[in-house]
Each structure stands twice: as C-alpha cells, then as structure tokens.
C-alpha cells in the first residue's frame, strides 16, 4: 500500500462566519424592520388623516343641517305674502271646514223699513249638489266652464214669513277664478239659483214660477246667489213691476245673501309668527 494510503483521514473543520459578518446582517435586518415600521406608521398616519377629514366633513354637514333645520323651524314673523296666503287658505276651506249651520246660520239679522232690526229664519238646508244641476242654463254654462266645485243651498223666510229666499253658495277654485266667472254671468234677474221648497213649511209653494227676482254677490272664492218670491204662491207674472220696486222683498233678499257672503269671506285673525303669536 502506498504511503498516502496509510495516513489517517483528517476531518475538515466547518467554516464559521466572522463576528463582523453577523453584525452586518443584524444591522441590515434591523434597518429593514425600521423601514417597514416607518412605512406602516406613514400609512397609518395617512389613513388617520383621511378618516379625520371624512369625519370632519360629516360633522360640518350635520352642523349645517342642524342650523338649517333650526333656522327653518324657528318661530319668526310672517311675511306679507304668508299672511295673505293664510287668509286666502282659511277663507277657501270654510265651505267644508265649517259646520253647515255656520255657513247658513239659523237666524240672520237684517234691516226693514224705518231701519227696524228684523230677523230672517232658516227653514231648511238642501243637500250639497253639483253647480250645474241647481241653477238655470245660462248660469250653469258659466259655472261649468270656470270649474265650479259644488253648490250649497238653504231657504230662509223674512220675519213675517211673507218672503221666501233661497241662497246658493257656489264654490269656485279660488278668488281669481270667481272674479272671472262673475264677469261672465248673465245680467238677467230671471235666472240664477233655483228655489228650494221644503214641504210642510211655509215655503212649500215656492218654486221657479214664484221666483220674483234673482241676484248674486261675490266674496272670496264664492258666488252667493239668491232667489226670492212670495210664500203665498204668487207668480212673477201676477205681480205688477211697480209693486216689486216698492216692496221690501228685494232688499230683504240682498241683505240675507250679503250677510252670508260677508261671513264666508271675513278675514280671520292672522297669527303674527310662524308658530303662533310668539316669535
């Protein structure tokens, strides 16, 4: 055996890193960790800034909304336009908001000959009816074209029960429409609201033939019609014109219809503020 084969094997020693190499690796790792930490902190800061900005914008919107709501609901004095609208709306709803006994009171005061204070008495109230169904044709065409909503009617007698007066309240959409409709009504005292008789009362003979005269007066969105005649059944043809001129018949009818019109259109008490009288 050659001399080399007789030598004992020698184990190779494992290479170990130098202390300086270990230090550099640790420093590099620490640097990477610091960089990642700083990057995370930056991202977190940016996120917090964005969240804060969103919250701030939301808070501002809530504050502005709250201020707007407070401003909107806070009691304040009514403007001239608001006061006018309040009056118009109050008057326009009275025909259905009031009890029918307020539209047509049981008694109505009027002035007779010698300025005597007298009282007309309500005999009965007719059912609510379409406008065109309870007036004469020339009046019906005008009310139809101007959008009349409904007609309320009642019949009165004067204090002596000599005259019967049917009052009809035509309800128009608004005052402007009522003015336009009034301008188109025929100038004819033979046409208007048809009489309403109540059987078993002093008015049971009051019909179209007994109607002596008709008229109307405007008030707010209402046209208040009136038809008057004698309770004894006299027809228009049987009464001389001069008798009508000198009788209390027509002034009585005018007074009763005019008083109902004034009740319906009388301006209400308007509150000073949007929430009553305290601003």
Image (cartoon, grey):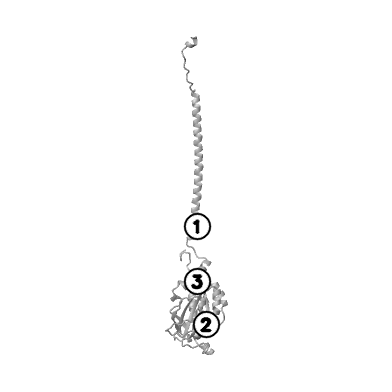
Residue at the spot 54% in from the left edge and 77% down from the top edge:
140
Viewer-nearest residue: 87 or 188: 188
Disc 2 marks which residue?
A: 214
Q: Which of pointers 3 and 2 lies earlier in the amino acid sequence?
A: 3
Q: Which of 155 and 138 is in front in this view?
A: 138
> Mark 3 — residue?
92
SS at circle 1: helix
Label 3 neighbour load within 10 Å: few <14, some 14-19, many 20+: many
In this rendering, which labeled residue sits more in front, label 3 or label 2?
Answer: 2
Considering every residue shown, the one lying at the far left of the view is 200
**Residue at the disc numbered 1:** 68
**Element at label 3:** helix
Q: Residue at x 50, y 57 (%)?
A: 68
Res 72 visible: yes
For marks 1 and 2 on the same chain, the one whose residue lies earlier in the sequence: 1
**Residue 101 point in image, percent of width and height:** 43, 76
């Amino acid at each position: 055996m050659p001399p080399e084969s007789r030598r004992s094997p020698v184990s190779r020693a494992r290479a170990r890193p130098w202390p300086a190499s270990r230090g550099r690796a640790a420093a590099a790792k620490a640097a990477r960790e610091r960089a990642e930490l700083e990057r995370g902190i930056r991202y977190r800061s940016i996120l917090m800034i964005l969240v804060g900005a969103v919250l701030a914008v939301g808070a501002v919107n809530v504050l502005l909304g709250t201020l707007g709501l407070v401003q909107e609901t806070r009691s304040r004095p009514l403007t001239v336009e608001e006061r006018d609208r309040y009056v118009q709306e109050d008057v326009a709803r009275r025909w259905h908001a009031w009890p029918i006994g307020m539209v047509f009171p049981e008694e109505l005061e009027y002035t007779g000959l010698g300025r005597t204070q007298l009282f007309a008495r309500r005999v009965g109230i007719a059912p609510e009816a379409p406008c065109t169904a309870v007036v004469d044709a020339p009046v019906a065409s005008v009310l139809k074209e101007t959008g009349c909503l409904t007609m309320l009617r009642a019949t009165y007698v004067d204090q002596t029960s000599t005259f019967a007066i049917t009052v009809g309240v035509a309800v128009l959409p608004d005052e402007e429409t009522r003015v336009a409709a009034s301008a188109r009504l025929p100038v004819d005292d033979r046409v208007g609201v048809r009489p309403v008789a109540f059987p078993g009362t002093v008015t049971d003979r009051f019909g179209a033939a007994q109607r002596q005269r008709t008229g109307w007066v405007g008030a707010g969105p209402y046209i208040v019609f009136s038809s008057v005649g004698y309770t004894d059944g006299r027809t228009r043809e049987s009464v001389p014109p001069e008798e009508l001129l000198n009788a209390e018949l027509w002034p009585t009818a005018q007074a009763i219809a005019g008083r109902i019109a004034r009740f319906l259109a009388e301006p209400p008490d308007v509150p000073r503020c949007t929430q009553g009288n305290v601003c």
